[in-house]
Image: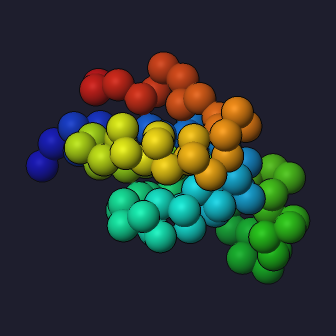
């Protein structure tokens, strides 16, 4: 088994929780699989609005879906689409 970076690219790095969930929904609607990766600090009792303030998450997509995923977010969010930054490269 290789590293996760061999299979997944970071589409959004350290997005806020709400932004990550919105991206996940858009990607799902477009048929693009994704994973959310972030700290899990045992805040099960908190709802999404409470988590949004302090729980960043990265949105990961398969490398072969990266360009299409960027297009989906750009179409939905326009100029407000976040840049993945340096994390979106093979490592």
Q: Position of residue 2 (x, y in %)?
A: 16, 42
Q: Residue at x 57, y 47 (%)?
A: 75
70 or 63, which lies in front?
70
Quadrant position of residue 26: bottom right
Above or below for 43 versus 6: below
State whether residue 87 is above or below residue 54.
above
Q: Nearer the viewer, residue 20 or 31?
A: 31
The structure residue drawn at horizontal position 28% and vertical position 26%, both measured from the top left corner, is: 90
Closer to the camera in the image, 5 or 34: 34
User: Which picture quadrant has residue 64?
Assistant: top left
Using residue 3 as the reference point, say whether residue 29 is left or right of it: right
Residue 88's place in the image compared with 23, above or below, is above
Q: As rendered, which of 37 and 82 lies closer to the eye?
A: 82
Seen from this angle, which residue lies furthest bottom? 45
The picture quadrant where one finds residue 79 is top right
| Residue 14 falls left or right of residue 62 | right
Please tell me which residue is depicted at 64% across the width and 35% down the height of the picture.
82
- Counting from the top left corner in percent of width and height, residue 58 is at 55, 45
Q: Is residue 90 visible?
A: yes
The answer to whether 90 appears left or right of 53 in the picture is: left
Colouring chosen for the image of the structure: rainbow
Q: How many marks?
A: 0
**Residue 6 percent location from the top left of the image:** 22, 38
Residue positioned 29% across, 25% down in the render: 91
Q: Farthest residue in the top direction? A: 86
Res 8 seen here: no
| For residue 44, above or below residue 28 | below
């Amino acid at each position: 088994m290789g590293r996760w970076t061999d299979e997944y690219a970071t589409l959004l790095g350290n997005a806020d929780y709400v932004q990550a969930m919105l991206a996940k929904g858009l990607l799902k609607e477009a048929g693009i699989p994704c994973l959310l990766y972030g700290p899990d600090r045992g805040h099960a009792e908190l709802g999404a609005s409470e988590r949004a303030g302090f729980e960043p998450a990265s949105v990961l997509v398969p490398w072969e879906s990266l360009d299409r995923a960027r297009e989906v977010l750009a179409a939905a969010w326009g100029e407000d689409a976040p840049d993945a930054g340096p994390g979106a490269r093979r490592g």
